[in-house]
Image (cartoon, rainbow, N blue to C red):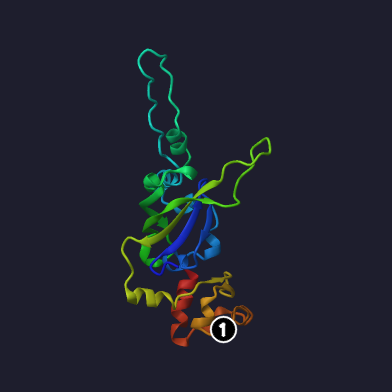
Amino acid sequence: MAINGFVIAVTADGSVFYVSPTVQDYLGFHQSDIYQSVLGLIHTDDRAMFQCQLHWSLNPPPYKELEQGTDAMPHVGSSTTTMDDPQHLPPENSSFLERSFICHFHCLLDNSSGFLDLNFHGRLKFLPGQQKRTEDGTLGPPQLALFAIATPLQPLSILELQTKTFIFQTKHKLDFIPMACDSRRKVVLGYTEMELCMRGSGYQFVHAADMMYCAENHVK
């Protein structure tokens, strides 16, 4: 578990395969909201770069010409076929599978200006059991995916981390009646989701001194 960030796994086609629940602390999205194309969460300027990080890009060594006096033909040795396939990559070249880069991710939190700079550090690995079938029905090669830990470029202070544990999200109808809320409301308020959503107007939970302030922002 990443205590100062979140874990994410993205397939080669850009689909989020897994993300840890701590993503909500840093991006404001619930864990279930992230299972989509990762490109929709990335700043447009960073999308091409992120796609490059998802693919195996090591070029094979150049062909060697045979000794003088023979026809010039490409020499395909064991090293070439091994270098082409990351599944059989020699240990001394495993660093080509490692990834470390910075990317701007869409963020719902108020202090992020819409995007948060994240540092991704991980490596490409194969997803067991995720082989796709080709047109003739045969199994294709195992699918590569990026497994990484994403951490803010500017780490949050201890006070900010503590404050985030008391924040929860709610969804309301236009008349402010609660429709849904995340699991943290039980820790912060003590109410179950049913108790919050079945008691009518959301103003029942607002202190009288804050009623007009809440109503003004509700109208806006």
Decide if residue 72 is in sight here. yes
Give the camera-side residue of 21 and 201: 21
Give the camera-side residue of 69 and 215: 69
Give the camera-side residue of 128 and 177: 128
Residue type for callout 1: Tyr
Label 1 belongs to which residue? 191
Looking at the figure, which quarter contains the N terminus? Answer: bottom left
Q: Position of residue 127 (x, y in %)?
A: 54, 52
Q: Position of residue 130 (x, y in %)?
A: 59, 50
| Direction from residue 200 to residue 151 in the image, left or right | left
Give the camera-side residue of 98 and 8: 98
Q: Quadrant of residue 202?
A: bottom right
Q: Position of residue 144 (x, y in %)?
A: 51, 47
Element type where label 1 sits in the image? loop
Write the residue at 41% across / 34% down.
60
Decide if residue 96 is in sight here. no
**Label 1: how many Cα within 10 Å (few below 14, some 14–19, many 20+):** some
Write the residue at 37% across / 48% down.
95
Write the residue at 38% across / 32% down.
61
Q: Position of residue 128 (x, y in %)?
A: 57, 52
Q: Considering only vertical position in the picture, is 78 above or below 142?
A: above
Q: Considering only vertical position in the picture, is 30 above or below 195?
A: above
Q: Quadrant of residue 3?
A: bottom left
